[in-house]
Image (spheres, rainbow, N blue to C red):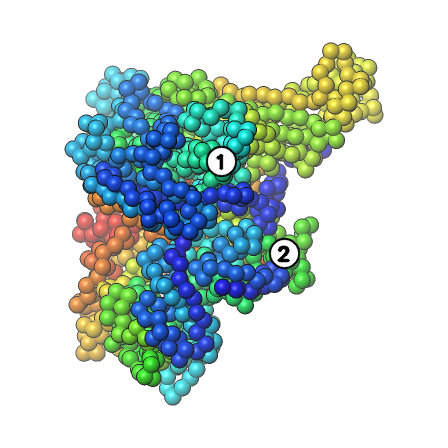
Amino acid sequence: MTSVMGTRMLRKEDPKLLTGENKFIDDIHAPGELWMGMVRSPMAHAKITSIDTSGAEGMPGVHSVYTGAQLQDMGIGVGALPCAWPVTEDMVNPPHLPVAVGEAKHVGEIVAVVLASSRYEAADAAEHVVVDYDELPTVSSLADAVKDEAMAHSDLGTNKAFHWPLDPNPEGTAAAFANAAHTVKAEFIQQRLICAPMEPRGCLAIPSPAGGEITFYSATQVPHILKVMIAATTGIAESKIRVIAPSVGGGFGGKLNVDPDAILSVTLANHIGLPVRWTESRSEAAGSSHQGRGQIQHIEAAADENGKLTAVKVHLDADMGAYMMLITPGVPLLGSFLYTGVYDIPNLSFTCDGWFTNMVSTDAYRGAGRPEASYAIERVMDIMAGQVGITPEEIRARNYIAGGEAFENHEAASTLVFDSGHYRPAHDRALEMAKVADLRAEQARRRDAGETKQLGIGMCTYVEICGLAPSRALGGLNYGAGGWEHATVRILPTGKVEVVSGSTPHGQGHETAWSMIIADKMGVDPNDVEVLHSDTAKSPLGLDTYGSRSLAVGGVAIAMAADKVIEKAKLIAAHQFEAAPEDVEFDAGSFSVAGTPAKSVHIQELGFAAFAAHDLPDGMEPNLQEQVSFDPPNFAFPFGTHVAVVEIDTETGGVELLDYIGVDDCGHQVNPLIVEGQVHGGIVQGAAQALYEEAVYDEYGNPLNPSFMDYLVPSAAEMPSIKLDSTVTPSTTNPLGVKGVGEAGTIGSAAAVINAICDGLSPYGVTDIEMPATPKRIWEAINSNGGAA
Amino acid sequence: MIPAAFDYTVAESAEHAIQLLGEYGDESKLLAGGHSLIPMMKYRLATPTQLIDVGRLDDLAYINRSNGHIAIGAMTKHAQLETSDVLAADCPMLQHVASLVGDPAVRHRGTLGGTLAHSDPASDLPAAVLALGGTIVAQGPNGQREIAASEFFTGYFESVLADDEMIVEVKIPAGTAGWNYQKFNRRAQDWAIVGVAVADGGKGISLVNMGSTPVRATAAEEALAGGASIADAAALAADGTEPPADLNADAEYRSHLARVLTQRALEAANG
Amino acid sequence: MDVSMTVNGTAQSHDVEPRTLLVHHIRDGLGLTGTNVGCDSSSCGACTVHLDGQSVKSCTVLAVQANGSDITTIEGLADTARSAGNATGDQDWHPMQEAFQQCHALQCGYCTPGMVMASVAFLEENPNPTEAEIREGLEGNLCRCTGYHNIIKAVQSVAGGDA
């Protein structure tokens, strides 16, 4: 049998999704369910002086109305929402209740909740709860938070939440800057982004009043983490909680939190003995779901006379929002290790200050800390190239780890050890595919002709940290849990293979990929593999999906469990053959005795033998089922080179992304179809940060663009066709040699696009442009230097 | 996001709709395609207690040639404008502008009469009708009256249309001479940050999103009529306007865009 | 008030509140949950269905406005193709559904029903589009997963007749 590994197998998930048969959270109903209608604060920072719920209470369909204070009195939702990543011992972590009591700290914070029979009635009633506020001074931007004048939390006396350093060799950094021939100093703003999975968040909590159990459906990336956190937060016994993630319509980090609505629906359902549900509306999400990015990066780099970088020094100010959510403070630190990028830079000094603001919390968004770091170093490389007087291509070539040759186990200045890399082939291939020489000629022609529409070419070479994560490494960072993943593989009596994974998909295609891994390992038809996931009753152990970890941790666990099943099956086969196990060979699903291939048994047949257990080797337990918790020894470090080509209308400031090339290396690929899809989507999300998206707030902390009318998720009409290729440098940290690819596109594309714009505008004296590079910003940048090329 | 409750009545005819408007008063609203009104109702920015559905008045969906102009029924959908052979032959600008409104699904529902009545200064079609020197036929309890597009728009989402009037027809002078429409936005589906419609070689120039109503670039039109060059005329495009500021643009940038786009539109229209 | 419509070939008659959005009537009233809601401003197109053969955003149509009309949702699309005799593939689907799977034009699948319905309607109006025309034709349908690349390929393959 030819292996399916590495083939473009069509996805098993698709039929249900293409016919409307599958169920997302809003498609699932429970008899007697009540809808939560949230009363949300319209003020960013205010004292709640009174709440009058009487207007809502008598309305049609209304079951009950609760304020935060009432819930506290009733003992419901009294536990603060969890932060699992206290990054320092002295990190400030103000209590974050599901419903605010006393003060509201951001627009959209829940101040009261209505329960009603329908979504319409819940919406109507929420409008009739009257809340009076006294406005308090508001911290409506990260820049304001850093000034530490107005306070996001009146009682804290400072907005600073923590200070976190990573400075393995301060003397080395100081000496490098002292001896530098060239230095670059820059400041970059990573604007707040709305995660905006196409499916809004939602939940449905179904109690069992007599049994004390609760079944919680949630559009979540993290059902297992949610289960633990619900137990820890509400006091409900973990064994009584079942969390189910149905079909989940995208996440991108936006669905990995423990949100107020989750705790509220569980505790209210438990209290009243009826199912309680909520579906977020798109515009509500700007105040009800965490956002991504929100950083100001101060970066300095030192280089010798040849443009060889010798040190990078970074100070990061990071916007936490109003409260610490699940991994809010840890996100910016995930980037700290990547400020030296793919380069052999011997010194890195990094500090990060976390700051509270009166905006909804930040937390993970695709790439989580790593796109920001990659952006900063890749922008700096271009700026340094200009200063040294060499091309962006050349400065990268001079600085690659191992001179661009293949390497293993490179210890970076951050002290992280990169598993493997080989940067030059991707670099060369991307430039070749982009036809950069032709583009430069066309660019020169347009410049000489003084044409209105100018061309810009930008590149980015990135590395990312995937496969989160080795549990010890997480422990070293003070993260509150491990990073292993669990898998069970069993052969059922009928010969079908059942895989249980703790990894939880939200669109990636896990069922397909896991089936392919099993098919490859066990020599079975991928259609004979069923995958169970996303339900803590079926898959009790797991750590879910984020940080490009599904394949590199969860997929590897499955492969290892399959190996264990094969080992046990081999013993049964040997027993049937009356041969020594070491004489039994396994090939394409069949066991046979060496030298007598005619006599063979297929592993699927042994499922029944193990189940019936009539004739197993002495002492062997019945059933073919094995499990593995895989804790990777290291992260995996995929990489790649991206090239963006933009056309800039120098009169209007409009930018068109003309062409995009990505050459990515994520180690061995299980299914290139899925890999390419991940990269396509990631590239567009990063390009969207560069060109379109920003969660904008006014000086009072009001979100100004909560809807898709104003928050500009790009459409097909704004995006080009994407040209991809890949190289393969296997990871050395796992037996499959895989690295992870979920975030790669996003990590490469924002910098490539902005580098292209800055390249196109270099004749106008433009050296930097803030994201998103709106037409207005570009027009202003051109004109700030007189407007003439 | 769910509209507040309201009552709903289907109008059997324009006369019936006007009668109902009279009966229900200013808490009622006409519903045509609904693609401006329903989103506002979902956000509860509009809370009419009575909707009068005129969207089913198929006898008001037509595009006819008539004595040197084109008569377009108020309930004609954008998609019908976009695919009209009559417009292709006699008023290609209106056809083209219709094809740039929103997205295909929006154009399947939105109507010309509804768009004009909504009077959004950021909409494409009102500015096109203005540049083309169109006339709006409104019907009220006392019969019909004709209103020049230049007299129709009075402010943000406001027009001279009385509470008990509805638009029944739009008359556009037939003409294929020198036209162009420039729409500048960030995403294809979005409203124009600035748009410029040029009709009849520049005799009609109107601007989208450059004030509280669609506005004529009068200074540019007059300069051009007086023999000024395209560049000189375009430099006056923003004169006399009071452009709004929003997340995409401030007044200064909008004025700049108006000048650039006017020059491009005039060059294309006369090219 | 009474609202009657034919949905995926079946006559349906229900008493609905006038403010009921067509998408909620389809999902909550008729139990056809394939059509999704992704925004509240008619921007994302996840709720796209066919109303009398044309694509509409069912979050911006009242159920009462659709009284007397013929609606097709993603659940009924394959049946319409079978009736028309142009269903394809092992699954006997509409060619657009088949093409979306073949081209990996979906990941999480949330925008997919709307994207498929919009694509089908688009090709009916423009059977031989350029790539740029397809991109413009899908301007009102947002996807957060695919970067659109494979969606465009899927629509191209149906337009080219090789799906």
Residue C78 horizontal/vertical position (percent): 63, 56
Q: Which residue is mark 1?
A: A273
Q: Depth check: B145 or C84 in front?
A: B145
Residue lying at the far bottom in this picture: please name it: B67
Report the Cα–Cα distance between label 2 and label 1: 41 Å
Camera-side mark, 2 or 1: 1
- Left or right for A317, reference A505: left
Q: Measured along the vertical axis of the image, is residue A53 above or below residue A186?
A: below
Q: Which residue is mark 2?
A: C78
Q: Depth check: B102 or A666 in front?
A: B102
Q: Which residue shows up at 23% across the image and 19% down it?
A: A175
Subunit of label 1: A
Residue A729 horizontal/vertical position (percent): 51, 29
- What kind of residue is marked 1? Gly
The quadrant holding residue B229 is bottom left
Callout 2 and callout 1 share a chain: no
Q: Which mark is residue C96?
A: none
Q: Secondary structure at mark 1?
A: loop
- Left or right for B4, reference A778: right
Cβ atoms at labels 2 and 1 below 8 Å apart: no
